[in-house]
Image (spheres, helix red, strand yellow):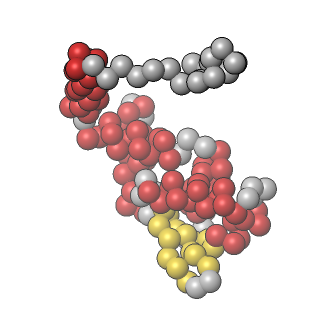
Amino acid sequence: MYRLITMQNPNPFPKINLSPACCITNLFTFVRKSTNSMSIKSVTTDEQQRIARYAKAMGHPVRMYVLELLSSQSCCYSGDLSEDLPIAKSTLSQHLKELKDAGLIQGEIESPRIKYCLNKESWKEAQILFKNFLGI
């Protein structure tokens, strides 16, 4: 919420209520929100959480391009990818990080470049999870 700063109201910040009743209400709200997020985790299975992580990592066209490229060849250097893609190197680096964090690719530092390859175990697991999920 934004407040207009004028001569009649020079302070744009509202006063904070620090009464004990207000603090207890905020504490209960925090506990309720924390409990709700914990119950979501207890409802989902480990398989659902893994497939969601893979789906999130694969949720961008550039990442899908990288996965498709790496599946058709053994490995690729990040410099080669930056020449192929019309995006900034820092953006490419973030996409590669997301794929690496999900375990779909792995990187080896060969100074001054990084060589990326598919993580074949995780890639195979992702394929099986998606096939089971889609009933294929």
Residue 50 location, x and y as percent? 35, 44
* Residue visible at 47% across and 60% down in the picture: 100
Q: Quadrant of the N terminus?
A: top right
Viewed as shown, does residue 101 lie left or right of 29? right
Q: Nearer the viewer, residue 40 or 19?
A: 19
* Residue visible at 50% across and 55% down in the picture: 99
* Residue visible at 41% across and 48% down in the picture: 126
- 72 versus 10 height, above or below: below
Q: Is residue 43 visible?
A: no
Residue 3 location, x and y as percent? 62, 18
State the image quarter where residue 128 is shown: top left
Which residue reaches farthest bottom? 111
- 98 versus 75 height, above or below: above
State the image quarter where residue 24 is shown: top left
Q: Nearer the viewer, residue 20 or 89?
A: 20
State the image quarter where residue 43 is shown: top left
Q: Is residue 81 visible?
A: yes
* Residue visible at 40% across and 39% down in the picture: 52
